[in-house]
C-alpha cells in the first residue's frame, strides 16, 4: 500500500466511522476555524423538517492527532446522545462509545491490513 497523506487518512477515517459506527441520524463532519475549542457536536431536527442530522465541527488548525481525538470524542457524543435523556454529556454510555471507537480504530489502522 502506498503511503497515505493526512487528507486521505482523514477522509478514510470518516468513511470507516460511518460504516462501523453509524449514528441514529446522518453525521456530517466539517473542519473550520474554531475559537477556544478543538471541536463540538450539535444535533439538528429543525421544525418542519423531517431530516435529523448531527454536525461535528473540528478546528482545522489543530494538529492531525488532536483532530482525530476530537473526531472520536464528538462521534461518541453523536452515538450516545439519546442513550438516556437527561444524562450528562460525558456519561457512561458516552465513555463506552468513545472506548469502542478508539480501540476499533487502533485495530483498523487505516485499513492497512486489508487486501
Image: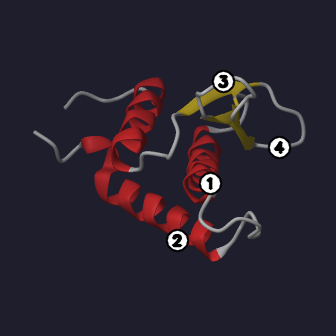
Looking at the image, is mark 2 or mark 4 earlier in the sequence?
Answer: 4
Tell me the distance, in whole angstroms, between the alpha carbons under discs 1 and 3. 27 Å
The residue labelled by disc 3 is 49
Task: Tell me what residue is drawn at x 51 percent, y 64 percent.
Answer: 97
> Disc 3 and disc 2: Cα gap in Å?
31 Å
Q: Which residue is mark 2?
A: 96
Dot in front, 2 or 4: 2
Residue 72, image x and y in percent?
Answer: 56, 51
Closer to the camera: disc 4 or disc 3? 3
- Disc on the earlier residue, 1 or 3: 3
Q: Would you place residue 34 above or below residue 72 in this image?
A: above
Locate residue 13, reporting x and y percent. Answer: 42, 38
Residue 14, x across and y down, in percent: 45, 35
Local SS, label 3: loop
Q: Residue furthest bottom?
A: 92
Distance CA(mark 1)–CA(mark 2): 11 Å
Q: Nearer the viewer, residue 27 or 103?
A: 27
Residue 73 circle label: 1
Amino acid at each position: 500500500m502506498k503511503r497515505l497523506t493526512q487528507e486521505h487518512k482523514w477522509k478514510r477515517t470518516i468513511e470507516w466511522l460511518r460504516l462501523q459506527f453509524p449514528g441514529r441520524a446522518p453525521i456530517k463532519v466539517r473542519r473550520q476555524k474554531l475559537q477556544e475549542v478543538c471541536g463540538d457536536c450539535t444535533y439538528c431536527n429543525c421544525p418542519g423538517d423531517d431530516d435529523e442530522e448531527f454536525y461535528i465541527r473540528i478546528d482545522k488548525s489543530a494538529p492531525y492527532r488532536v483532530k482525530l481525538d476530537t473526531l472520536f470524542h464528538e462521534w461518541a457524543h453523536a452515538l450516545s446522545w439519546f442513550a438516556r435523556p437527561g444524562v450528562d454529556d460525558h456519561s457512561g454510555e458516552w465513555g463506552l462509545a468513545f472506548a469502542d471507537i478508539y480501540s476499533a480504530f487502533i485495530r483498523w489502522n487505516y485499513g492497512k491490513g486489508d487486501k
